[in-house]
């Protein structure tokens, strides 16, 4: 600082406090915001580049499978059909429930909670699907994108990560395999060498199924490889979690109702909240309609809310069935003939019942009927069909007397 005019002014040094000097030397708030924004943009660009590379690997994998394994198309389509959770409710559950009730109950809980978590994960992760990403990405702007074929099961309408088929198959088959192993270990009739052989065979079967499901979902261009791997891992975690709980086998009807309402309200509330924040969780539906080569391949039963109500109906129906007076009455039957009759009758009647398809012209009506249809499946399997079979066997035995 200079006092006075001219060149002979007096220079005075003013020593500022350390806090003021630090404040003057430190970057301003605007500088910090600009720096943070630049770092975020750079990070986003790196993430986008990494995801583009990951998605490109998935497209390349799909193209390779469709080109080199075209003869296996029927097998891959069958695997995708078989891995659908519908088969858990209509096939595996009736068989297991009448053979070993606890395993059947666990299958429903693993399938329902796993698929509910899958829905939430998909809403959070915003995963792309192969069949539309390959058309929309600028990744191939400098060249031609690989040709990807579509199939009737390709055009699912929800987000892609993690894979619901892979997650469901991993959870359900993990629950079945571990249950069979537990049954074998409790049996004292089998030798240790036989048990080890069976364990090896069952786990080889389990991983064989998972590999087939993953390859199938990649082949039909419904998922990228990292999405099916994520589905397998999360499905196994869900199944392992339910193998450690016991309350599901003695849950009251009130608990079934409360859990169903909680899961339903949480998902709907989460959807509404993000909708208010400007996030459209049904963004994938437009992509499916736009890029699916045939409009009839876009099915309403693959939408997120269809899956949600289907699972909630199944869980609610299981609770109703287990606490029905018909279930208490039919539980007295334990013979092999009774169990076999229940399994056969359940599989036949549920197959006929599955032929009923709710009308899709009105979304609200479709969702309501889907809920009711899903609730009827476990209700009939657990109480109505066993009660009728027990009555038929009782009448037949009286006639023989």
Image (cartoon, rainbow, N blue to C red):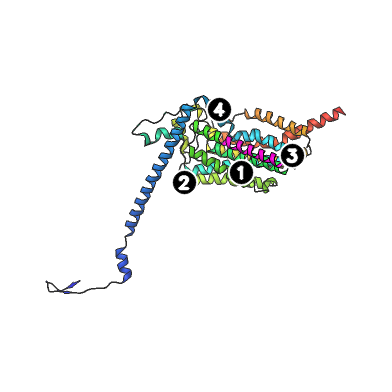
Q: Earlier in the sequence, mark 4 or mark 2?
A: 4
Residue 239 — which label? Answer: 1
Can residue 382 be seen here?
Answer: no
Q: Earlier in the sequence, mark 2 or mark 1?
A: 1
Quick one: label 2 or label 3, which is nearer the N terminus? Answer: 2
The residue located at (61%, 40%) in the rendering is 174
Q: Which residue occupies 55% across, 43% down?
A: 233
Of tags 1 and 3, the one toward the viewer is: 1
Q: Which residues are magenta?
A: 190-210
Quadrant of residue 316 within the rendered picture: top right
Q: Is residue 40 left or right of residue 122?
A: left
User: Which one is in front in this view, the residue at disc 2 or the one at disc 1?
Assistant: 1
Which callout, 4 or 2, points to the residue nearer the camera?
4
Labels 4 and 1 touching (C-beta < 8 A): no
Q: Position of residue 362 (x, y in %)?
A: 54, 32
- Judging from the image, what secondary structure is the residue with disc 2 in? helix
Front residue of 142/40: it is 142
Work out how far the residue at label 2 is from the one at label 3, CA to CA, in angstroms. 45 Å
Residue 246 location (% of width, % of height): 68, 48
Q: Is residue 243 left or right of residue 332?
A: left
- Label 2 sits on residue: 276
How far apart marks 1 and 3 lie (CA) works out to 26 Å
Residue at image mark 4: 75
Q: Tags 4 and 2 in contact by the CB under 8 Å rule?
A: no
Tell which of 247 and 66 is nearer to you: 66
* Residue at 42% in and 36% down: 56
Q: CA distance from mark 4 to mark 2?
A: 44 Å
CA gap between label 3 and label 4 equals 39 Å
């Amino acid at each position: 600082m200079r006092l006075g005019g001219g060149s002979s002014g007096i220079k005075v040094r003013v020593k500022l406090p350390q806090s003021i000097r630090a404040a003057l030397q430190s970057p301003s708030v605007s500088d910090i915001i600009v720096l943070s924004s630049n770092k975020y943009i750079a990070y986003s660009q790196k993430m986008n580049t990494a995801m583009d590379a990951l998605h490109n690997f998935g497209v390349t994998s799909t193209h390779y499978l469709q080109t080199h394994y075209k003869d296996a198309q029927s097998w891959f389509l069958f695997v995708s059909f078989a891995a659908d959770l519908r088969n858990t409710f209509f096939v595996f559950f009736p068989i297991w429930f009448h053979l070993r009730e606890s395993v059947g109950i666990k299958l429903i809980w693993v399938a329902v909670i796993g698929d509910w978590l899958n829905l939430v994960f998909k809403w959070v992760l915003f995963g792309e699907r192969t069949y539309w990403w390959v058309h929309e990405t600028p990744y191939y702007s400098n060249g031609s994108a690989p040709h990807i074929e579509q199939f009737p099961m390709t055009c699912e309408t929800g987000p892609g990560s993690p894979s619901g088929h892979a997650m469901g198959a991993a959870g359900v088959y993990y629950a079945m395999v571990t249950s069979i192993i537990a049954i074998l270990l409790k049996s004292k009739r089998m030798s240790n060498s036989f048990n080890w052989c069976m364990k090896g065979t069952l786990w080889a079967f389990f991983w064989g199924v998972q590999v087939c499901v993953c390859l199938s979902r990649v082949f039909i261009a419904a998922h990228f490889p990292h999405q099916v791997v994520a589905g397998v891992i999360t499905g196994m975690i869900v199944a392992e979690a339910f193998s450690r709980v016991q309350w599901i086998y003695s849950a009251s009807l009130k608990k079934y109702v409360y859990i169903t309402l909680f899961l339903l309200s949480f998902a709907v509330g989460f959807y509404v909240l993000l909708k208010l924040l400007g996030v459209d969780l049904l963004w994938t539906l437009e992509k499916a309609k736009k890029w699916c080569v045939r409009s009839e391949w876009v099915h309403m039963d693959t939408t997120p809310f269809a899956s949600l109500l289907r699972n909630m109906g199944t869980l609610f129906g299981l609770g109703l069935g287990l606490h029905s007076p018909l279930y208490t009455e039919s539980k007295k039957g334990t013979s092999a003939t009774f169990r076999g009759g229940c399994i056969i009758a359940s599989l036949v009647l549920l197959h006929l019942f599955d032929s009923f398809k709710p009308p899709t012209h009105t979304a609200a009506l479709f969702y309501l009927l889907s809920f009711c249809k899903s609730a009827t499946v476990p209700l009939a399997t657990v109480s109505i069909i066993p009660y009728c079979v027990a009555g038929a066997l009782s009448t037949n035995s009286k006639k023989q007397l």
